[in-house]
Amino acid sequence: MTPIAWMAATVAVVAALVDWWSVAADRRRIEYVAKPLVLVALIVVAVTLVPAQDVVRWWFVVGLVGGLIGDVWLMFDRFIPGAAAFLLGHIAYIVGLLTVPLEAGWLAVGVVLFVITLATVGRRIVAGAWQRSTVLGLVVVGYLFALGAVLILGVGTAVTPAVLGVLVFALSDALLAWGRFVGTTPGGRTLVHVTYHGAQALLVGALLVL
């Protein structure tokens, strides 16, 4: 970690704490600044740290930018453009993860976890989205499988921060989608933000090892 990366990481932590408070207190104006600031700071961390592999770093930066754009769209309740931005971000994570060594046993674990997710919360979320509209249902299905690929490949790296990052990412997205298409989100919007920021931070940290 370079000095600039450490400074940006500090900004990310402070901005995340402010964002979580603003969500819990329903201070939308503060949230609209703090939430994207977290991703901006994490992008600076990813750009300025010394990664294990430079090619992985740049694909992950694209993934973070996709997350930043998605955050902005979701803040204005534009779900489909937001989901599209996150989908592009997940595709970038997939490409980045495909450039690192993967372990067959861990990939199998990832597949099992994804199948369990599909059979439980996934089918409920897809059904809820499909009831709204066919287009929305298709978007959610496509996003779900992209997230599944990130989950499988991330677990397949057998690298602790990457494994934890994709698991927490899956949890965050499941909570968000459940709240939109099924019912009340367990833990509310605050938990969605906490898990989302934690996942992105873990993936950035994984760049030091991948």
Image (cartoon, helix red, strand yellow):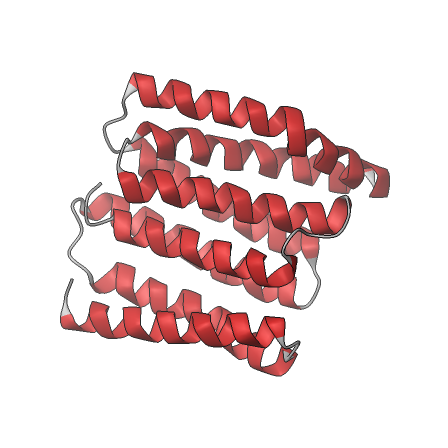
Left or right side of 191 for 12: left
Would residue 174 appear left or right of 96 to someone viewing this image?
right
Closer to us: 135 or 197: 197
Q: Quadrant of the N terminus?
A: bottom left
116 horizontally vs 58: left or right: right
Q: Residue at x 63, y 80 (%)?
A: 27
Residue 186: % across, % down: 66, 51
111 sits left or right of 53 in the view: right
Q: Give the tally of numbered discs.
A: 0
Quarter occupied by the C terminus: top left
Percent x, y of residue 42: 35, 64
| Residue visible at 68% across and 68% down in the picture | 76
Q: Which residue is drawn at 52% across and 35% down?
A: 146
Residue at the front extreme, as displayed: 187
Q: Is residue 101 above or below residue 84?
A: above
- On the image, the x and y values in percent for residue 152 come to 42, 28
**Residue under the image location 36 percent in, 37 percent down:** 95
Q: Residue 151 appears in which quarter of the rendering? A: top left
Counting from the top left corner in percent of width and height, residue 138 is at 71, 35
The image shows residue 28, relative to residue 80, as above or below, that is below
Q: Quadrant of residue 198?
A: bottom left
Compared with 53, 26 (above or below) is below
